[in-house]
Amino acid sequence: MKVALFIPCYIDQFYPNVGIATLELLEKLGVEVDYPEQQTCCGQPMANSGFECYSKGSYELFVKNFKNYDYIVSPSGSCVYHVRHHFNIIDQSAEVVHIRDKTYELCDFIVNVLGNPQLKASFSKKVGLHQSCHGLRGLRLGQCSERVGEPFSFAESLLKQVEGIELIALGRKDECCGFGGTFAVSEEAISVKMGKDRLADHLEHGVEVLTGGDMSCLMHLGGLVKRGNQPIEVKHIAEILNSSC
Amino acid sequence: MLTHPEAAASFNKDEDRVNWHDKSLWFVRNKRDLAVNKIPKWEALRETASQIKFNVLSNLDTYLEEFEGKAKANGIQVHWAVDGDEHNRIVKSILDKHQAKKMVKSKSMLTEECHLNPYLEKHGIEVVDTDLGERIVQLAKEPPSHIVMPAIHKKKEEIDELFQETMGTEPANGDPQYLTNAAREDLREKFLNADVALTGVNFAIADTGGFVVCTNEGNADMGVHLAPVHIACMGMEKLIPKLEHLGVFLRLLARSATGQSITTYSSHFVKPREGQEMHIVIVDNGRTEQLARKDFLNSLKCIRCGACMNTCPIYRRSGGHSYGSVVPGPIGSILSPNTDMKKFSTLPFASTLCGSCSDVCPVKIDIHSQLYKWRQVIMKEHPDKLKKAAMQVNGKVFKYPWLYDFLGGFARKALKIMPKGIIYSKLNAWGKQRDLPEVPETNFKSWYKKNRRNNG
């Protein structure tokens, strides 16, 4: 099985530890992982701003970098969602169809491709899970509260395996945090208010570590935590699943 | 008109009010969740409704003609209006024919869309909205802020004051019972003296020529039963093919809207009673144009339940008026650009694309995908020049790995050495209330090259 790691641009630049945790976690689980070094971005920032025409170069580069792998794994539901659902303006060649089909969010890959193996992780903290929208409602990595059906969550099922962890139930279990890409700056007031409300939910329920599968949501929430000196840590789910503390 | 970000920022100056507004609507969203979870095949019901509506939109011409034929045969007079102006003129001509000076009206978003009230008032006709929420916003001289709960933005204490000013009520400390009774008494007199009753239409049934009006207050029935003339106004997409399809929609509508299993009144109108005149005005007003937009035609499936507003985290925190459109919220943001792309250009961007709207929609409109698609159309037709330039540069940076690597490293270094005062200048909207991430010593790519490449 040839697996490539896709590290989104902002994780590459600002959160190398998340990339490292993802890589180490996959290696621990016995996966041989390649990191194509010519990778940049999935093209989402331009496309969500209404300029998908300027994303074409990113799409084509993505296909070029990843076409020769069986699976492409990324610690970001949002970027995976973009690859799977929005690579529409380029020619839908067999290669393009392949990469769209085989790009996986990290938890999804571990549960559904690797078959939910034992993680042997331990993390003795009260953890609140932020269900990122693109993962939850876009990729259907869990049952969202809007729809009627059996509850499930790939991220939650992995976190439950972690020794010592206490998963905290929240007031609103899957409301958006308000990041939304350029929305975070173009609608600054609402974006911040949404983030503050999400954070308050975690704080009120005694969460010590806020985690999630999308570093972009966590960057937004983390920015609020830092500015407000809030007593809560923000960690990507890969860091918890890879930890042995 | 303020842009959505401007109006939303203004609404957010009063955080307590935002919290109150958010909680009021979240309460309704929760009620909806409880109600729909009692229907095990809820998702199948949504799919069925979605397909019925798709069939309607695909065969709209034939269903409309079928409906017209059947309605006429039942003795209903049918009128066609190409736009809001024609709709208003038709309504007025019916009023004129009867020398009517007083009209009561139950809730109709279509008449809001056509601006019927100001048009008729200009011509000396008294129009009274009889839905309590509509009556409140009418007295306050405001547009509705929600399509199902038009006065959801008003606190009961504010309604108390409004009633004191407009109806001369006693101060009642916002007591809902007192205020409702006061409105009821005031409206009773209007009902009794109305020359004409106007209603909206929730569902028009092609194979019977009848139509259904759903209310919780019985105000549509009260008006229609007392007045000698009934005018029903409907957007041309309100059709369903057969009476047997109605059950699907009635089960979905109230549960999605308010968490009720059904509206208190689901009134069927088939033909005028003896001595009464019944009219239907079928309105296009841009719907044909929307129907021709392949990516957006599904928006016409909307049954106006308002569930997308109640669930939308942006709507709940910016208020319905921030959208500046007749229909606010997510569905309004995909309907309004069809009528005026420039005026409503910020609406498709008033979303994080979280997708909650699409998942509550009882007719499965892919609202968030359409928001994404409207963004592409709007930036093509009316580009934001600054954003365009920035995105063009981004596109180049991400196209060339060497440029991305170089600029990424450069930006991290710059952020490390630049004084905080410059980083957090007024131009940095991110940094107004949030910190930027701490800049790491190295990026992942460099770490990988050092620690993994050729090591294995």
Image (cartoon, coloured by chain):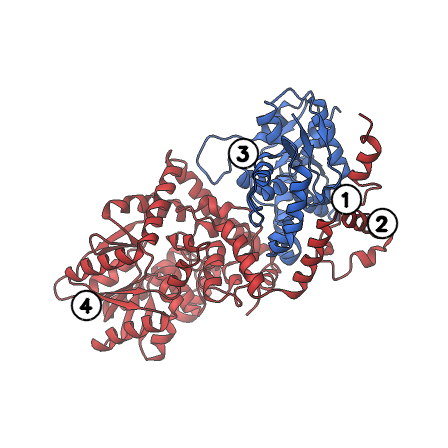
Chain colours: A blue, B red
From mark 3 to mark 4, how far is it between C-alphas?
Answer: 55 Å
* Rendering quarter of residue A232: top right
| Vertical comparison of B205 with B137: above or below | above
- The crowding category of the residue bearing disc 3, from other C-alpha atoms within 10 Å (few below 14, some 14 to 19, many at least 20), is many
- Bin the neighbour count of mark 4 within 10 Å (Cα to Cα): few under 14, some 14-19, many 20 and up: some
The subunit letter for the residue under badge 2 reads B
Q: Residues within 10 Å of mark 1 (few under 14, many from 20)?
A: many
In the rendered view, would you say B313 is above or below A115? below
- Could you say which is closer to the camera, residue B26 or residue A57? A57
Q: Amino acid at mark 2?
A: Lys
Which residue is outermost to the left? B274
Q: Nearer the viewer, mark 3 or mark 4?
A: 3
Q: Which amino acid type is shown beneath numbered disc 4? A: Pro
Between marks 4 and 2 in the image, the one whose residue lies nearer the viewer: 2
The amino acid on which the numbered mark 1 sits, given as a three-letter code, is Gln
Residue named by callout 4: B228
- Where is mark 2, residue-wise? B413
